[in-house]
Image: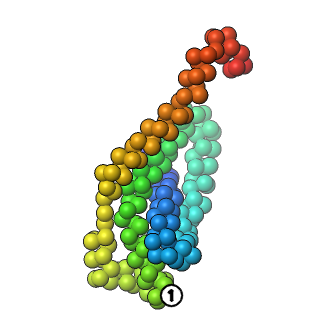
């Protein structure tokens, strides 16, 4: 993996983790009853994702153009598969981080509501008490939540596969071929 591909994968990871953690912000907003404050605080964090997205586009475009110029179209398929794997891994990791970041965002929303200063919030995060809270606030998703998520994923996959299976069972081979044309 060359440096440019590593940078693109890193940017993809950041974009998808932050997008997944948006759910933690919604939970924190509901729990603290300060939805507007939590969304404004997340807007600041989302700027990181949007900045990463603005860098990612030109990197991918340059990579595609160079591969086409070198007649290496097969390399693009591998690159885009790696981007998809990175995005999937980031979404899974982001999902596992939701309980932890929900606690962090709740605490940050309360602190931001009291002080109304982003610089004070950042100083608080990097103070001794803030670092202790980061360590103590980390949580692993409960087994029950993971089991519910796995069951829901199975339902979604089954529902997505069903229309194709029904179509294949009810149609003749000639009907399937005419559908492809």
Q: Which residue is more in the foreground, 83 or 108? A: 108
Can residue 83 be seen here? The reply is yes
Q: How many residues crowd around disc 1 within 10 Å: few (fewer than 14), some, or many (20 or more)?
A: few
Can residue 6 be seen here? The reply is no
Q: In this view, does 172 lie to the left or right of 12?
A: right
Could you tell me how many numbered marks the image carries?
1
At 68% from the left and 20% from the top, the residue drawn is: 180
Quadrant where the N terminus is found in the figure: top left
Q: Position of residue 156 (x, y in %)?
A: 50, 39
Q: Which residue is more in the foreground, 56 or 108? A: 108
Decide: is 171 above or below 35.
above
- Secondary element at image label 1: loop
Quadrant where the C terminus is found in the figure: top right
Q: Residue 52's image quarter?
A: bottom right
Q: Where is residue 10 in the image (x, y as percent from the top left)?
A: 45, 55
Q: In this view, does 131 lie to the left or right of 22?
A: left
Residue matched to label 1: 116
At 43% from the left and 83% from the top, the residue drawn is: 111
Q: Which residue is more in the foreground, 176 or 71? A: 176
Decide: is 136 above or below 166.
below
At 59% from the left and 37% from the top, the residue drawn is: 70
Colouring convention used in this rendered image of the protein: rainbow
At 68% from the left and 14% from the top, the residue drawn is: 175
Q: In this view, does 38 lie to the left or right of 146?
A: right
* Outermost bottom residue: 115
Q: Where is residue 79 in the image (x, y as percent from the top left)?
A: 51, 41
Q: Is residue 51 left or right of residue 3?
A: right
Q: Where is residue 81 in the image (x, y as percent from the top left)?
A: 50, 39
């Amino acid at each position: 993996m060359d440096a440019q591909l590593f940078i693109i994968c890193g940017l993809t990871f950041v974009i998808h983790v932050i997008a997944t953690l948006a759910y933690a912000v919604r939970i924190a907003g509901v729990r603290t009853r300060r939805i507007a404050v939590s969304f404004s605080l997340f807007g600041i964090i989302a700027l990181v994702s949007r900045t990463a997205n603005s860098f990612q586009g030109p990197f991918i475009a340059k990579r595609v153009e160079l591969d086409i110029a070198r007649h290496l179209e097969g390399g693009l398929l591998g690159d885009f598969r790696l981007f998809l794997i990175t995005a999937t891994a980031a979404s899974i990791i982001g999902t596992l981080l939701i309980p932890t970041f929900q606690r962090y965002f709740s605490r940050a929303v309360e602190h931001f509501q009291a002080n109304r200063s982003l610089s004070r919030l950042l100083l608080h995060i990097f103070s001794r008490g803030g670092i202790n809270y980061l360590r103590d606030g980390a949580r692993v998703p409960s087994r029950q939540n993971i089991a519910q998520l796995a069951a829901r994923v199975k339902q979604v996959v089954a529902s997505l596969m069903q229309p194709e299976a029904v179509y294949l069972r009810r149609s003749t081979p000639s009907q399937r071929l005419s559908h492809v044309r």
